Image: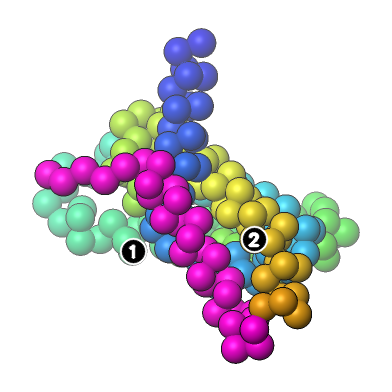
Amino acid sequence: MELFASLFNAALLAIFLQNSIFERALGPNILIYASRKREHVIGFSLVIIYSTTLSSIIAWVLDRNFSSWEYFGIVTPLLYILVISFIYILSLILVWRFLPKVFGKIKTYVHLSVFNCSVLGALFLSSQFGESLIGYIGFGVGTGLGFFLAGYLLYIAHPRLNSELVPAAFRGLPITLVYIGIISLSLYAFVGYATR
């Protein structure tokens, strides 16, 4: 039960307090693209959950075994990018080989989802806040669920943000960015501001 509580706590922290879109501004371009259709929001979110969770497990192994190395902080971004690339290539090969029909459906989402700033940001957040393997997995799952939450909020607002009631100068991307900013500020107010 304590294991589940730790996983749940890390996931909630990644979804609401350290949301990759609203708090860290990682990957809003993919989110804006994905929010146009419900299928895109679900597809991108599932791929991000998959890639961040598997990458977080490998990142935990790397962090535990090599964190004492003097230059680990310098090569960490490169190692994380290599981990994400390995997961990406291995997953594409396996799906292409064993599930060719599924490959045709997911190839739209995979490339943009895996090489997204929120996936790399999830690994950095995991190494910063996750102390155990469960914490890393929780941040991986939570980042994907946070992306889904942000995508769903944009999806349900998309028709209103692009309606004729919005002035032409603000319609489309400008009002969408203002909307993301307002949600970011509301979550920021929910979390609170603390000085060190």
Q: Is residue 125 visible?
A: yes
Q: Is residue 183 magenta?
A: yes
Majority secondary structure of magenta residues: helix
Dividing the picture into quadrants, the one containing residue 14 is top left
Query: SS for tag 1?
Result: helix
Dividing the picture into quadrants, the one containing residue 9 is top left
Span colored in magenta: 167-196
Determine contact: label 1, label 2, CB under 8 Å: no
The residue drawn where x is 48% and y is 60% is 182
The residue drawn where x is 37% and y is 47% is 189
Label 2 sits on what residue type?
Leu
Cα–Cα span, label 1 and label 2? 32 Å
The residue drawn where x is 15% and y is 56% is 71
What x and y, as percent, mark residue 84?
Answer: 49, 58
Give neighbour class at mark 2: few <14, some 14-19, many 20+ (Cα, 10 Å): many
Q: Position of 151 compared to 115: left or right?
A: right
What x and y, as percent, mark residue 1?
Answer: 51, 10
Q: Position of 135 compared to 40: left or right?
A: left
Using the image, tell me which numbered label, if any, was put on residue 154: 2
Whichever of labels 1 and 2 marks the residue nearer the N terminus, that label is 1
Q: Quadrant of the C terminus?
A: top left
Most foreground residue, 38 or 154: 154
Q: Which residue is mark 1?
A: 78
Q: Going by the picture, which residue comes out furthest to the right? A: 101
Q: Is residue 132 magenta?
A: no
Q: Of the residues tagged 1 and 2, which is closer to the observer?
A: 2
Most foreground residue, 116 or 67: 116
- In this rendering, the answer to whether 168 lies above or below 152 is below
Q: Position of 155 compared to 2: left or right?
A: right
What x and y, as percent, mark residue 12?
Answer: 48, 34
The residue drawn where x is 36% and y is 41% is 191
